[in-house]
Image (spheres, rainbow, N blue to C red):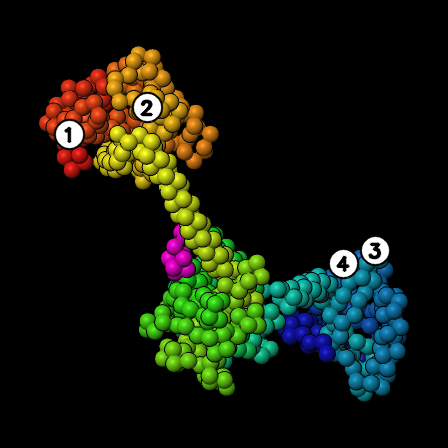
Amino acid sequence: MPKKSTSRTQKQLVAENEDLRARLDEAEETLRAIRSGKVDGEQIFTLKQAEDALQKEQGRAQQYLDIAGVMFVVLATDRKVILINKKGCEILGYVEQEIVGRSWFDFLPQDEKDRVAGTFDQVMAGEIERMEYFENPILTKSGQERLIAWHNSMLTDEAGRIIGVVSSGEDITERKRAEEALRNREGMLQKIFDILPVGLWLADKDGKLLRGNPAGVKIWGAEPQVSPLEYGVFKARRLPSGEEVAPDDWALVHTIRDRVTIVDELLEIDAFDGKKKTILNFTAPVLDARGDVQGAIVVNQDITERKQAEDRIRRQLEHLTALSVIDRVIAAIFDLRLSLSEILNLTTKELGVDAADILILNSNSSTLEYGAERGFRATAVRKTQVRLSESYAGRAVLERHLIQIPNLRNEPNNLFVTPLVIDEDFVCYYGVPLIIKGQVKGVLEVYHRTSLEPDAEWFGFLNALAGRVAIAIENATLFENLQRSNSELTMAYDATIEGWSQAMDLRDKETEGHTQRVTEMTVKLAGVLGLSEAELVQVRWGALLHDIGKMGVPDGILLKPGPLTDEEWVAMKKHPTFAHEMLAPIRYLRLALDIPYCHHEKWDGTGYPRGLKGTQIPLAARIFAVVDVWDALRSDRPYRLAWSEEKVREHIHISSGTHFDPQVVEVFMQNPNLM
């Protein structure tokens, strides 16, 4: 139903028009009386005055109509226009003479004529109730349609019969267009409001949420058209701190109370449908023209999936980093217990479990034995030695796949629930076999004292850890075997070299025992001078083989009891070269060649076989030269007796800087325990 106008001006003009019509009727009645001779001259004069007054009133009324801001139209019962004001002419675009006397329906669109023609005739005939207000378009001279809101008043005669209608009309075309545009805009905004993928809530100035869009309702798990706050207190925590938000500490409260321009916060909420969600919350004030806060807009964006994806990526990076650290541990640490301990540190941290251990398979006894542990309250786990048929870990070995017990307390097989598990208050158990190259090396066990809900990524990391542990055990085993092999090989090398040395002593009776003595002294002196363990091994072998080159010297020269001739000395001095030729082809003895090849070189360059001088002579050879002379002079020979210690010390001291390296001599003299 159209609304009834309450315009006071229109009502007044209609009333004045009716009053004017009544006066005109009265004047016409008086004129008829004059013409019929029913009134005298005095009455005629009086009536003349009344007629003049009436004409003035009529002119004044016409002025009122012309200055009115609405159009006035008077129609007769035959639809013809008998009066129209200036505003009406302006709206229609015609002059008054082009309108008065024509049917009003000439100024209506064709479809409007068909709609109201019959109704107008029925109203004029009194057959239906008159319409005091209605809206319909009119057609202007230029062909445009204008929408008019009409207020109508019926004209009747003395008998109450309808003789016409007075209508005041207001051009509401622009208003209607504005209203339609507003409705369209509101409809568009409503559609946007409804289809926005983020939650949108409107709040009043008291902080009460008035309405929310479907996305907002879905985010909070609330019933449609019901704000989250109507559910009472709900839990929300600020991220990343995890601090729970108090009711008076909401962004909405701060926005309205403290006039904060905009507030954004990252929240973790317990929605009303029972789901935990992460939302990005924005709150902004709604201000009026004076800048006063009239309410607020709250925008929620559900970033739960994004947050979960970010967490998964972060965990994957952490896991990759942990696996990289484990790889470095495996490569750098050959102590199995130590490497397993480091692996378990990362295992408990990255898996988020309370405890973990590694049991190593003893294939000879078919038992699992303690390897390493983390997170256990007691040390009883370190005594673990269980048969494969008596434990969950044994099942993991025999079945060669992961064993998981979500709740040990509900497990019917009490045989496997050991006192260790009971005393530690464990609830969850996971055991994964350690398999490498098709062989089971042991079991990685993890325990937790509360319920766990591991996902596929968790299990994937557990299996990756098990693979690394298997590699660590395999590498440690290989390294241990390699060390054992190296030790056995080194012992074999040592025995071989000692055998050669003993063979030399058997051939050269006068130097019997000399080789063992100088070897021991040389190694000690080299240690004092700072040579490494690896270098000392080579020094020892070089000392044992220092005279190996004499095997190339003929017995007649080597075993000659008296002094050698010049020619014989030439042959004897070739034994360092013979040593080099004999030992150089043996790769593992190349570093030991310094002593057999260079121990007869002298500090001043007068030695043999190459005449090396100073530091050109290898350090091992310089060390051995001092020890060799010391032992030779302190031993009896067929051609002389042994010298006294004081005489030998003096000889070595005098030879420092010519025969011997002065620094080596100084260290040797300062350490009597070496002699």
Residue identified by numbered label 1: 669
Q: Nearer the viewer, mark 3 or mark 2?
A: 2
Q: How far apart are labels 4 and 3 at the CA level?
A: 12 Å
Tell me the SS state at disc 1.
Answer: helix
Q: Nearer the viewer, mark 4 or mark 3?
A: 3
Residue 558 badge? 2
Question: Does 99 sit left or right of 237 as displayed?
Answer: right
Residue 142 badge? 3
Q: Earlier in the sequence, mark 3 or mark 2?
A: 3
Residue identified by numbered label 4: 90
Q: Is residue 337 magenta?
A: yes
Q: Nearer the viewer, residue 268 or 327?
A: 327
- Coordinates of residue 47 in the picture (x, y in percent): 75, 75
Q: How far apart are labels 3 and 2 at the CA level?
A: 145 Å
Q: Earlier in the sequence, mark 3 or mark 1?
A: 3
Mark 2: amino acid:
Leu
